[in-house]
Amino acid sequence: MSASGERKVSASLGRSVRGTTPRLADLASTPETPRTPTLGRSVSSLFGSPGGSFRTEDEYVVIEVGSRYLRGGFPGESTPRCTLPYDPENQRRVGDYRQWDPDYAQKRRRPKKGQEWGQEYELYRMDLTKVDLRVVEDKFERMMREVYNKYFVLDTKPRRILLALPPKMPHPLMSTLLDVLFGSFQAPSITLMSSPILSTVAAGLRSALVVDIGWAETLVTAVYEFREVHEQRTVRAGRLLSEEMAKVLNAAQVEQLGYVEDDDTSFEEAEEVLSRVAWCKPKPRSNRRTLYFPARTSPILEEFEDAVETPEPTVTIPFPKASPPAEVTIPFATLAKPAEAALFATETALSEFDDHELPLHHLIYRALLSLPVDVRRVCMSRIVITGGVSAMPGLKSRILAELEALVQTKGWDPVRNYGTASARHEQILRQKMEALELRKQEGEDKVPESLDPDNPLPAAHRPQDVWHHEAGVEREKTRAGPPPESLVGGVVRGVETLGPWAGASLVAQQRIRGIVEIDRERYLQHGLQGASKDKEVSVVPQRQSMGPGVRGGAGDRASWTLGVWA
């Protein structure tokens, strides 16, 4: 090999080595500077950038605002950088050093006079008659400054914000949050997205029935093709559950320690017990039996006479902040009573509830009953249960079991009371159930119209005739294997989700434009009053002629809207 050829080979090898591994001389000569900690930054956000820049996705900042927590992070990450609670410890004034007092840490904190249960731990309430918006603005601004300065550690370049909010938020409260983001943090634009839509995106679905068990209320939202088509609410949520747990703990302390009313359990103690040892019982066997076939259920095995009974498991709960500190032993089954009373209310008749305090399974059933047939078929097979309370062990399976029992016993009949015709209606339902049982046992292609020729089934309860070509198509589908996700429907089924923040992170990373995009200059001029009255505005850029050599920016909008918040 010639000398020139050797020089070319060595130069090419040098380029390949320099492209992969730095030289020791380069490492020694390059000064090392402090780096921003990644704090669990995902691989996709580091190496999945489409451009040549390292952090091009940081043009967006993803923020989720709830009634008790604030979550923030960057697009492309599976978890938020921070989850900050609203509590009195984070809202102290300058010069308040009570937290370093040894006696202060050992005392139970009493709620202030006139405050409701857990009010100090909330950022806002939907009832604005009891909310001071100036205090809300100060709390939110303080939390956002902590997020930007402590967890984001960004430069001074203003960044757009994708804000995840619950639907139907009052306009004064929304205006307060936007004033902070536009004024104090100089965001050029803010994209608003609804939490149920983002939960659906995080579950990998286009349509779902999102059950958000939050702090103040439980929200059931039907999402069809990324649009909210129906919504119902109930007050049976985390606050009521926490109050029920406090009642259980107070009763145990009075019984075992003889405490009086002044020694009630504090909010922090109830939350600690609720997050650690609370659970939800499965559906009772007595309620699992169908309405018309009690004899066909599986028999219950009888216990042997000489079987040794095991003692009931118990849990010892310490109360170090009580005076004096003590411990209480509570049966493990008792810790499931708060969920039974607060979320399901099985001991109360359904007729005694108002529309805003329905149990969870009845609320979900009525939400499905209010949907059109095709939307109901899709949503009932994609039930997404999310929210802080949904992490309780056994709660999701209990909700699905109760809902399936309601569907089996009541069907999809919107009439709740037939009056004098109730006996006739029950007879029709009994005939329908018997016909379905015969079909399952004998494997017939057709269900008989009625077992009693004198009382035939009405047309609404008769199955549709199956044509021969449809039967052939179904047979081919069975041979091909399980149907795809888009074809699953008609059965009660739950789907897991990563939560609203993960959905917002995915939407921001994919650069998907939302329906509600608020520009800073337009908002500072007119506020929320400058929004259009239309519920939706097309996000497709329109071609406009503005003269020779002049062209409008792609995607510019003549007006903007508040979408579901209008």
Image (cartoon, rainbow, N blue to C red):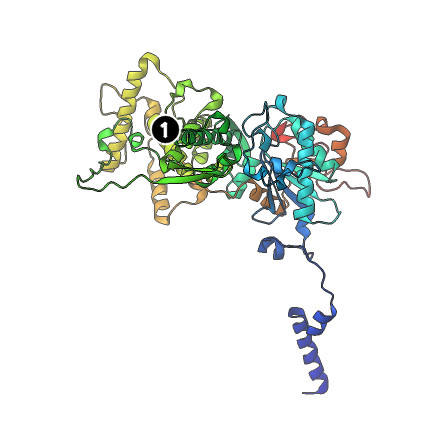
- The answer to whether residue 344 is left or right of residue 38 is left
* Of 424 and 340, the residue lying toward us: 340
Q: Residue 129 at x, y = what percent?
A: 63, 21
* Of 489 and 312, the residue lying toward us: 312
Residue 121 makes an appearance in the image: yes
Q: Residue 229 at x, y = what percent?
A: 53, 29
Helix, strand or loop for disc 1 = helix
Q: Splitting the image into 4 quarters, where does residue 111 fall?
A: top right
Residue 153 sits above or below residue 207 on the image: below
Specify the amino acid type for callout 1. Answer: Leu
Q: Of all residues shown, which one is farthest toward the front?
A: 324
Which part of the image, by quadrant, shows the C terminus? top right
* Of 386 and 282, the residue lying toward us: 282
Q: Splitting the image into 4 quarters, where does residue 256 fall?
A: top left
Q: Residue at x 67, y 70 (%)?
A: 22
- The answer to whether residue 157 is left or right of residue 325 is right
* Of 217 and 494, the residue lying toward us: 217
Which part of the image, by quadrant, shows the N terminus? bottom right
Q: Residue at x 49, y 22 (%)?
A: 356
Q: Which residue is tagged 1?
A: 406
Q: Of all residues shown, which one is farthest toward the top?
A: 420
